[in-house]
Every structure is written in C-alpha cells, then in structure tokens.
Amino acid sequence: MAEHDPHDSHGHSVAAWTAVGILLVASTVMSAAVLWPNVAVFVVGMVIAVIGVVAGKWLSMAGYGSKPPTPRETVELH
C-alpha cells in the first residue's frame, strides 16, 4: 500500500468550505433545472458554480486557504 505524508489540515479552510458550500448550492440549482426542464435556471446554476470557484480561489489567495505542509526530516525505515 502506498504511504501518504500526514497533513494537518486536509484542506479544512475558510476558502475550501466557502467554495464547497457555494458549489453545493449551484449543483442543487442545476439539478432542479434538470428535474423541471428550464434552461435559464440551469444557466443561473452554472453562474453560481463559477462564482464558487472564483470565491474559493480568491479567498485562498487572500490567505484564508490551507497552509502548505512544512518539510519534515526524512526517516529511513530499516
């Protein structure tokens, strides 16, 4: 099995949660547009999705994203 480096945050940040929340709303709107065929509502959902991606990236660039993991010393396994 592949070994993974442990990360402290796993992306738990304001930027990540904001993006995911907005994208969940967007997917709900787009799903409703598929259930009740309406192109305009689907386009509104797509716009909300773009806003979610942009908001997440903007918040990450503003310092609300995950911090990169700190380099650790390598440990040799015998």
Image (spheres, grey):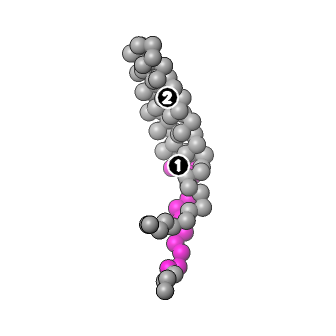
Q: Residue at x 53, y 49 (%)?
A: 60
Q: Residues within 10 Å of mark 2 (few under 14, many from 20)?
A: many
Badge 2 amino acid: Ala
Q: Is residue 26 above or below residue 76?
A: above
Residue 63 lies, in percent from the top left, at: 57, 52
Residue mark closest to the camera, 1 vs 2: 2
Residue 55 lies, in percent from the top left, at: 51, 39
What's the mark number on residue 60?
1
For label 2, the SS is helix
Q: Residues within 10 Å of mark 1 (few under 14, many from 20)?
A: some
What's the mark number on residue 26?
2
Residues in magenta, as a range: 60-74
Residue in the foreground of this view, choosing between 39 and 6: 6
Residue in the foreground of this view, choosing between 54 and 76: 76
Badge 1 amino acid: Ser
Q: Residue at x 49, y 86 (%)?
A: 78
Q: Residue at x 47, y 68 (%)?
A: 3
For label 1, the SS is helix
Spatial separation of the CA atoms under disc 1 and disc 2 = 20 Å
Magenta stretch containing residue 73, yes or no?
yes
Q: Is residue 25 above or below residue 13?
A: above
First of labels 1, 2 by sequence position: 2
Q: Main secondary structure of the magenta part?
A: loop
- Side of 11 where 50 appears, left or right: left
Residue 10 lies, in percent from the top left, at: 56, 55
Residue in the foreground of this view, choosing between 27 and 35: 35
Can residue 41 be spotted in the picture?
no
Residue in the foreground of this view, choosing between 16 and 62: 16
Circle 1/circle 2 CB separation < 8 Å: no
